[in-house]
Amino acid sequence: MQNKYTFEDFVKIIERLRAKDGCPWDREQTHDSLRPCMMEEAAEFVSSIRIFHESGSAENMREELGDILLQVVMHSVIAEEEGLFTLGDVIEEVSEKMIRRHPHIFGTVQVDSSDEVLENWDEIKKKEKEGKAWIASPLREIPQELPSLTRAPKVLKKIDKLYEKAPGREEVADRLREAAGKLSDCSEGTDKKETERLLGDTLLLLCEIARREKIPAEQVLMDRIEELIEEKER
């Protein structure tokens, strides 16, 4: 069955909504006002993957991808109205990026594993970021808007690579035991700021373990929370 609407049709729909005689709500939206929408839609798509595995239905996944596409097109249309860039610019830039970051496909570089692909990707990405005015340091290029359990391993990885070597496995384990012991010794009268610092140190150490083992800490905690809920609902 042929789709009724094309990508070009969809862009025209969004442009119509943003027109002077378009939808009052859509016309009022800005990059800032749409920030929560983008975060929510991304989370809902991640949720749709879980729903697919549980139900076998891809309907929700398809719907949520459409909502993310809506956000991409809406931001691009707003940017064009502001004279910043166009949707064509967005497509052109990401296409060039994919070609540039896959020299083993579109060039002559030889790779033997996905690890080598990621190493090349990181090196190319590093060169791309050089001289960008909005990046104060390599650590600042990791968005602070990321969930902390996702952001922390990325920051720790860059610190390990660019600033100082990460502690060894045994040292991390010793630090974790020490931090956990201090936390368990905290009493009701313990200074809250000190407890927060100890908790933060413990979480960072757990994220370092997750980084070393290539385990997605955010997803692991999310899955464990769901398991806990299921256990209590039985």
Image (spheres, helix red, strand yellow):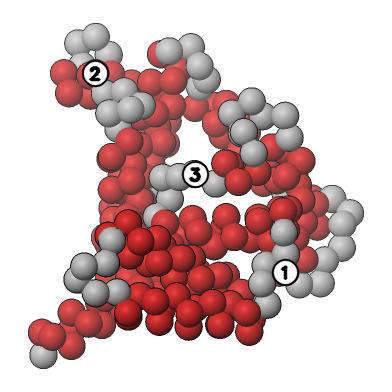
* Dot 2: element: helix
Please identify, in this view, whether the residue under mark 1 or under mark 3 is nearer the observer. 3
**Residue assigned mark 1:** 115
Q: Which mark is residue 143?
A: 3
Q: How crowded is mark 3: few (under 14 residues within 10 Å), some or many (20 or more)?
A: few
Separation (CA) of disc 1 from disc 2:
45 Å
Q: Is mark 1 on a helix, strand or loop?
A: helix
In the figure, is residue 108 to the left or right of 161?
right
Query: Quarter of the image holding residue 34?
Result: top left
* Mark earlier in primary sequence (1, 2): 2
The Cα atoms of the two marked residues, 1 and 3, are separated by: 24 Å
Residue 154, percent from left and from top:
57, 57
Camera-nearest residue between 167 and 155: 167
Judged from this view, the residue extending furthest toward the left is 233
- Residue drawn at x 54%, y 62% is 153
Q: Decide if residue 66 is in sight here.
A: no
User: What element does badge 3 sit on?
Assistant: loop
